[in-house]
Image (tube, rainbow, N blue to C red):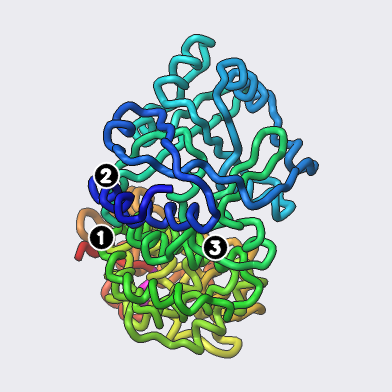
């Protein structure tokens, strides 16, 4: 066994010293002898002058042979399995697929890990005339091929050479333990051989069975390697935990102390994780906890919000099939706050318009039976310009919990204004800048009729003695704020 002092000196000259010290402590406690590491990259061998610990035995001894596991063996996976076996490269399932199988769920997609380097994989696939999909991930060890109408994503085992809280420089290895040690959560650090043997170095199966969300090794170190893991923690808490209060206090303290790291993460990556949190369980509890941990300023969210309203809306969301941004509207009091958030998180235009619409109207929702006419006028007035207005209204009604109005407007066909500008122009009595005011006046007349007048009945208002000024006074227009005229750039 190497003396700890000598080991630390070598680690300091290599990379990610805190990570290697963790690995050393783990293996020392496991009474495992330190021996020469095996790296599949020459660059990694040159970089690591130290002897690294021998790969330990996994802590779980479980064999999986469920119907969900067997269903993964498509023609594509069988082809890849045979190819890697023939070339003596280990290939295992990893990440979410393993987690789902242990939860008796059928994985939506599969990720594979291997000791083969990207160059070795590319050479294998090209030799067999297997189509390669994209070269974008090769620098990080990921090769994607397409076999039998299925994309197969395979990543070389790797370790983080340098991390800055956002990105990592990696080197490749053939040590499964080192690869597991760079992952975020224990139940995401498991592997599964293609004959069903579970490889679990960090007791991920035990944490999964006990519904615990736990970082691999030291939580603070994992977070500092990639600050987005803060949001991944809350996402998986909503996915795995059965009790919204079962947070580990030390983990929450680490999150609070490192909240500032989210400032350096791109808005797109932040929003990707937040969307998954909004689609999971414990939405109210998660956002309340994130607020208490001081995350909101780094997510473009307001520092003050109506906690009771958020709780009420989230409770409704469970059975109303809300859009993922609908509960988020409870956090905002002004449209300016919406603009700040959407600019930070880079929401899509559709998401922005839903959020904007709900916040614009949530404080002035019509009441009683008159609300049906009010919503009707809102739809008809705005539908000419934004076809998504009806679906936005559905989300507003879900937000308000107005089930009666929601049922009424679910299959509602919005009346269509029967006249077009060309038809008005063809009458020859008005032209140029007069057409738009005339159209608005005719629309007001149509609205006043309860949206029943036909095209011919509207055209009867044209005549040599028509006084458009008087008509405009008789049928005033109604201003509606159904959508922002233009998305603000802050």
Which residue is painted at 55% across and 24% down in the image? 89
The reply to whether callout 2 and callout 3 are in contact (CB within 8 Å) is: no
- The stretch of residues the image draws in magenta is 478-482
Which quarter of the rendering shows the C terminus? Answer: bottom left
Query: On the picture, is 404 further left or further right than 158?
Result: right
Which residue is painted at 49% across and 41% down in the image? 54
Q: Is residue 480 magenta?
A: yes
Q: Give the spatial CA distance, label 2 vs label 3.
A: 33 Å
Image coordinates for residue 288, horizontal then vertical, percent: 46, 81
The image's mark for residue 264 is 1
- Front residue (pair 360, 441): 360
Which residue is painted at 24% across and 64% down in the image? 488
Is 26 drawn above or below residue 286 in the view shown? above
At mark 1, the secondary structure is helix
Q: Is residue 279 magenta?
A: no
Q: Give the spatial CA distance, label 1 vs label 3.
A: 22 Å
First in sequence, mark 1 or 2: give its number. 2
- Front residue (pair 261, 470): 261
The image's mark for residue 14 is 2
Q: Nearer the viewer, mark 2 or mark 3?
A: 2
Query: On the picture, is 204 further left or further right than 179?
Result: right
Which residue is painted at 63% across and 77% down in the image? 243
Image coordinates for residue 268, horizontal then vertical, percent: 35, 55
């Amino acid at each position: 066994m190497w003396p700890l002092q000598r080991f630390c000196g070598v680690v300091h000259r290599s990379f990610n010293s805190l990570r290697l010290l963790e690995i050393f402590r783990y293996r020392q406690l496991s009474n495992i002898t330190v021996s020469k590491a095996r790296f599949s990259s020459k660059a990694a061998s040159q970089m690591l002058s130290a002897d690294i610990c021998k790969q330990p035995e996994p802590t779980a001894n479980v064999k999986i042979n469920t119907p969900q596991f067997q269903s993964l063996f498509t023609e594509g996976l069988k082809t890849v399995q045979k190819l890697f076996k023939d070339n003596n490269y280990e290939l295992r399932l990893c990440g979410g697929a393993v987690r789902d199988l242990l939860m008796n769920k059928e994985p939506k997609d599969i990720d594979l890990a291997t000791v083969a380097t990207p160059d070795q994989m590319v050479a294998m696939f090209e030799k067999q005339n297997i189509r390669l999909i994209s070269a974008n991930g090769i620098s990080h060890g990921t090769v994607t091929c397409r076999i039998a109408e299925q994309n197969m994503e395979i990543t070389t085992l790797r370790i983080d050479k340098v991390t800055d809280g956002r990105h990592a420089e990696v080197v490749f290895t053939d040590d499964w333990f080192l690869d597991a040690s760079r992952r975020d959560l224990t139940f995401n650090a498991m592997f599964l051989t293609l004959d069903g043997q579970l490889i679990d170095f960090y007791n991920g199966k035990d944490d999964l069975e006990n519904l615990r969300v736990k970082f691999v090794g030291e939580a603070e170190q994992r977070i500092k390697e990639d600050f987005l893991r803060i949001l991944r923690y809350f996402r998986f808490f909503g996915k795995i935990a059965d009790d919204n209060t079962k947070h580990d206090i030390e983990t929450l303290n680490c999150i609070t102390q490192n909240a500032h790291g989210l400032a350096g993460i791109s808005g797109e990556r932040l929003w990707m994780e937040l969307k998954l949190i909004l689609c999971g369980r414990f939405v109210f509890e998660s956002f309340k906890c994130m607020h208490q941990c001081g995350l909101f300023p780094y997510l473009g969210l307001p520092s003050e919000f109506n906690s009771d309203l958020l709780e009420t809306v989230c409770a409704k969301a469970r059975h109303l099939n809300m859009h993922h941004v609908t509960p988020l509207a409870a956090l905002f009091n002004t449209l300016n706050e919406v603009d700040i958030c959407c600019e930070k998180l880079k929401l899509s235009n559709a998401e922005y318009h839903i959020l904007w619409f709900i916040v614009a109207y949530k404080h002035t929702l019509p009441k009683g039976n008159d609300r049906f006419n009010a919503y009707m006028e809102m739809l008809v007035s705005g539908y000419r310009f934004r076809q998504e207005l009806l679906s936005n209204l559905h989300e507003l009604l879900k937000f308000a919990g107005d089930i009666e109005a929601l049922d009424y407007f679910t299959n509602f066909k919005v009346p269509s204004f029967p006249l077009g500008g060309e038809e008005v122009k063809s009458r020859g009595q008005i032209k140029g800048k007069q057409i738009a005011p005339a159209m608005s006046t005719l629309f007001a007349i149509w609205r006043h009729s309860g949206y029943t007048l036909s095209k011919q009945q509207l055209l009867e208002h044209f005549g040599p003695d028509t006084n458009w000024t008087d008509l405009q006074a008789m049928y005033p227009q109604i201003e509606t704020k159904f959508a922002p005229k233009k998305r603000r750039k802050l």
